[in-house]
Amino acid sequence: MKNDMNDYLIKAESRILAHLQTNRVSKTIEEASSYSIKAGGKRFRPYLLFAALESLGADLEKGVGAAAAVEMVHTYSLIHDDLPAMDDDDYRRGEPTNHKVYGEAAAILAGDTLLTESFHLITLDTRLNPDQKVEIIAQLSEKAGQNGMIGGQMLDIEAEGKNITFNELEDIHHYKTGQLIVLPIKIACIIAEASDSVMDPLLEFGDKLGILFQIRDDILDVEGNLETTGKETGSDARKNKMTYVRTYGLEGAKKELDKLTGEAETILNSLADEIDISHLYRVLQRFAVRDK
């Protein structure tokens, strides 16, 4: 890869922290918001955005602000997910969850800050033209909103303790997880001004990637541990959540993961004559494919 992806991930994080430091009202909100960003994580969504830009032959510098905004929205969702009224988790990314450190009220407001300021960050991005800013903000709000992640989260909560169909399970994760994974690819296509003939298969790939990512996460909730995953495992079973492991069994979930991996690879191969698919192959291998 001609660009060092880690350099761009660092730039995106620095952009977030610098923006949060412009807080002139509450030091607590700045600290609480920054705490969950500094906790690290896989940075999957910014990585995917930069990989898509590189595959499309675009300038990665143009994606730094958008990558920062996407990570802010994702981190806000984790802060709120961990609250007692939601998943009630004590650890995230190997550290105590936000509400365990700052209290529930500050954690709620820290999440609200990250969500709201993500849009502000896009408006300040001097590398994007006005039309791109409007398109990216529209995508960010749609994919995170009631017809995206939030809608999926509500479906997930309503499904707890129930026997739901496989199609209902797929719907949950299409929205709850998948929309914020399709989002970085869509943003990269906006920045790179990709044609529909390229963008449409890439978005389909993103949709597959979202399901792959969720199945892998469900498997790790059974087979992982706090040291490797950064959060307590076994929580899905304790909360009686419907997961891919519960639906297929552990071995069945692994087979489904392998099947979907093949489908995602087929989509990428169909684009091999138009873009450099190697960068997106690395994303697939790094974040979504299980260790054999």
Image: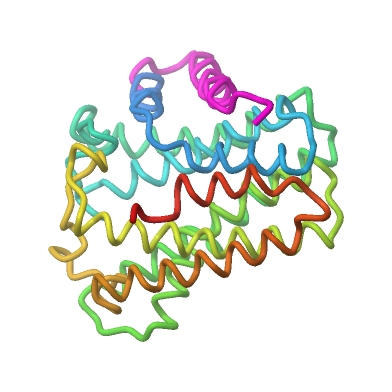
Would residue 5 be counted in the magenta stretch? yes
| Residue furthest to the front | 292
Answer above or below: position of 57 versus 180.
Answer: above
Quadrant for the C terminus in the image: bottom left
Q: Compared to 26, does 75 lie above or below?
A: below
* Residue 137 to residue 168: above or below: above
159 vs 186, nearest the viewer: 186
Query: Does residue 264 sit above or below 129 in this rendering?
Result: below
Residue in view at x 46 percent, y 33 percent: 113
Residue 166 found in image quarter: bottom left
Q: Position of residue 7 (x, y in %)?
A: 57, 20
- Name the residue nearer the viewer: 212 or 124: 212
Magenta stretch secondary structure, dominant: helix
- Give the residue drawn at x 69%, y 61%: 269
Q: How far across and how far down the image is residue 50, in percent?
A: 64, 36
Residue at 62% x, 47% y: name it: 280
Which of the image's four quarters has the N terminus?
A: top right
Q: How many marks?
A: 0
Q: Tell me if 99 is positioned left or right of 173 in this view.
A: left
Residue 285, position as x, y percentages in the image: 49, 49
Q: Is residue 74 left or right of residue 272?
A: left
Q: Position of residue 177 (x, y in %)?
A: 46, 58
Q: Which residues are magenta?
A: 1-29
Q: Is residue 71 magenta?
A: no
Residue found 19% across the figure and 59% down from its top: 222
